[in-house]
Image (cartoon, helix red, strand yellow):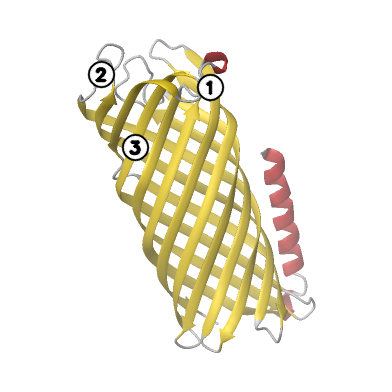
């Protein structure tokens, strides 16, 4: 991870050095701010193995149908210089969302391949939070009399999900090792905080469809670290506030399209659709017990998928 971060820092440094050549000839062609608001739907699941990989899936958590209200902003800075055949391009994005609905399922198994399920509970995931921030830079190349523009990009991003588990109901249980089926858990108030952070490479395109209609597209590949901590509040044998943590290498893809209508040279209205898919695997699960001891097993995989649709209003200063 340190090597990847150093490479990004070096490339950003080179970008800034090239962009400042002949500063007197620089010309700002865009400095824009866009405010977005809309809906997003997420799902995230993870599973761990037992000791010595027996069983291959011991415990599995799934957050499904997280309905999220999201707000965010996008800012772009484009600077041209007559000494080079390209423009310097910087993009900053950030958003925050809060879930109003969602379901959680927690399953535990004694046999391989998710067999001999001895415990299953369901719960609510409302009031969970998500946020994302990403910065990238590159050089913009123009074609077809500036109607089509292409920007190879490098950047760094951080994404977090603070996921709740509340108001549970036991669906499968023997009443001895785990609560009996049908038992309600009104005091359940556990949390799982996940982080995906690291460098990415990608490309932005801009297509001037007509004098007032513009399409922007984005594709990114992320090579990141995955870290998560959990607080299982009903487990007296676990430590608190950190009951266990997860660590793994991960990767993700992001695709986004924005259609923008230009009211005039400054004000614009846009609609954006975003899809992202992330996966972490072959990591570690470290459980911390209330007596001060800990144990480690395998984190098999983590899967996160997100879809959002947003509308926005933007202002361009140039």
291 lies above or below 264: above
Nearest-to-viewer mark from 1 and 3: 1
Instruction: Please state, as top left, top right, bottom left or bottom right, where the N terminus lies in the image.
Output: top right
Q: Position of residue 156 (x, y in %)?
A: 61, 52
Q: Residue at x 46, y 11 (%)?
A: 293
Label located before the other in sequence (1 or 3): 1
* Res. 215 image quadrant: bottom right
Q: Position of residue 213 (x, y in %)?
A: 52, 83
Label located before the other in sequence (2 or 1): 1
Q: Nearer the viewer, residue 82 or 220?
A: 220
At mark 1, the secondary structure is: loop
148 lies above or below 8: below
Q: Nearer the viewer, residue 106 or 191?
A: 106
Return the residue at label 2: 179
Q: Nearer the viewer, residue 148 or 263?
A: 148
Q: Residue at x 51, y 80 (%)?
A: 317
Q: Residue at x 45, y 31 (%)?
A: 229
Q: Which mark is residue 104?
A: 3
At mark 3, the secondary structure is: strand
* Res. 307 image quadrant: bottom left
At mark 2, the secondary structure is: loop
Classed neighbour count for the residue bearing mark 1: other residues with Cα under 10 Å, few (<14), some (14–19), many (≥20)? many
Return the residue at label 1: 56
Q: CA distance from mark 2 to mark 1?
A: 24 Å
- Dots 2, 1 in contact, CB < 8 A: no
């Amino acid at each position: 991870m340190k090597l990847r971060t150093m490479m990004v820092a070096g490339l950003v440094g080179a970008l800034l050095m090239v962009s400042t050549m002949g500063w007197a000839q620089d010309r700002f062609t865009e400095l824009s701010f866009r405010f977005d608001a809309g809906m997003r739907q997420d799902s995230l699941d993870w599973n761990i193995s037992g000791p010595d990989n027996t069983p291959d899936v011991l415990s599995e958590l799934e957050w499904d149908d997280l309905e999220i209200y999201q707000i965010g902003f996008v800012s772009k800075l484009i600077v041209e210089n007559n000494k080079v055949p390209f423009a310097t391009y910087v993009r900053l994005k950030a958003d925050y969302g809060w879930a109003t609905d969602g379901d959680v399922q927690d399953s535990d198994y004694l046999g391989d391949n998710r067999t001999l399920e001895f415990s299953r509970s369901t719960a609510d995931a409302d009031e969970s939070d998500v946020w994302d921030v990403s910065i990238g830079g590159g050089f913009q190349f123009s074609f077809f009399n500036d109607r089509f523009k292409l920007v190879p990009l490098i950047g760094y991003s951080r994404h977090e999900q603070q996921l709740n588990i509340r108001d549970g109901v036991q669906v499968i249980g023997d009443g001895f090792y785990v609560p009996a089926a049908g038992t309600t858990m009104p005091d359940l108030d556990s949390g799982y905080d996940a982080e995906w952070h690291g460098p990415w490479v990608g490309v932005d395109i801009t297509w001037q469809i007509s004098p007032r209609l513009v399409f922007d597209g984005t594709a990114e590949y992320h090579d990141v670290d995955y870290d998560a901590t959990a607080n299982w509040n009903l487990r007296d044998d676990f430590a608190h506030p950190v009951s266990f943590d997860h660590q793994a290498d991960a990767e993700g893809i992001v695709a986004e399209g924005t259609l923008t209508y230009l009211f005039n040279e400054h004000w614009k209205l846009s609609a954006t659709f975003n899809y992202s898919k992330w996966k972490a695997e072959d990591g570690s699960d470290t459980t911390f017990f209330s007596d001060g001891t800990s144990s480690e097993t395998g984190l098999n995989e983590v899967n996160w998928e997100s879809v959002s649709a947003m509308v926005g209003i933007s202002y361009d200063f140039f």
